[in-house]
Image (cartoon, rainbow, N blue to C red):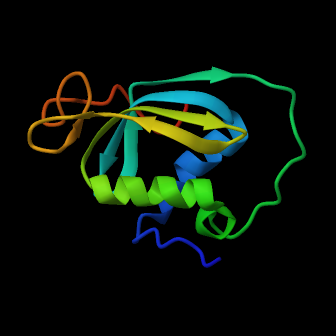
Amino acid sequence: MSAVDLKGKDADWTQLFNMITVECPHARVENLVVVDGAPWGYTYIDFTRARPREEQRAAPGPSDRMNPDWQWFVRECQELRDGIITEVHFRDGNPITIRGVKSAMGRINGLLGGDRAKPQRALALA
């Protein structure tokens, strides 16, 4: 299977990929803001700690390590391009489901609406 094309957004995807796979592999991300087809920010992450599993070896970039679940998620964000995905659920470091609300205009919006929503945090955890 070939690597997914991150369309020049490698740093944005690397940051989210590492945060989920290393820090919060069992999590629900609320109001994920997607800008130009890549993750930009979020309202908060609701995570669960589980007994650590074997560590993954670091590869040059996330596109080389992304399984079909991640490739599906990247394509969903690229299709959305700009908007807010109200929830993303991760299990074992992999995106499992996304939840959104479609407006009459076809955009996926958060509770505030895609044009008025402002993230409260950048992707990096403080």
Q: Position of residue 117 (x, y in %)?
A: 21, 29
Whether residue 29 is situated above or below residue 67 in the rendered picture: above
Q: Residue at x 16, y 45 (%)?
A: 106
Q: Position of residue 40 (x, y in %)?
A: 37, 45
Quarter of the figure that contains the N terminus = bottom right
Q: Residue at x 75, y 22 (%)?
A: 49
- Residue 79 image position (x, y, % from top left): 31, 58
- The part of the image, by quadrant, that contains residue 33 is top left
Left or right, 100 with respect to 87, comes to left
Question: Could you tell me how many numbered marks the image carries?
Answer: 0
The answer to whether residue 49 is visible is: yes
Q: Which quadrant is home to the C terminus? A: top right
Say whether residue 51 is left or right of residue 33: right
Q: Residue furthest bottom?
A: 2
The residue under the point 54% across, 27% down is: 28
Q: Quadrant of residue 2?
A: bottom right
Residue 126 shows in this picture: no
| 48 relative to 26, above or below | above
Q: Image quadrant of residue 78? A: bottom left
Q: Residue at x 62, y 40 (%)?
A: 20
Could you say where residue 87 lies in the image, as x and y percent from the top left?
A: 43, 30
Q: Where 111 sits versus 73, above or below? A: above
| Left or right, residue 97 beside residue 79 | right
List the single residue furthest toward the left: 105
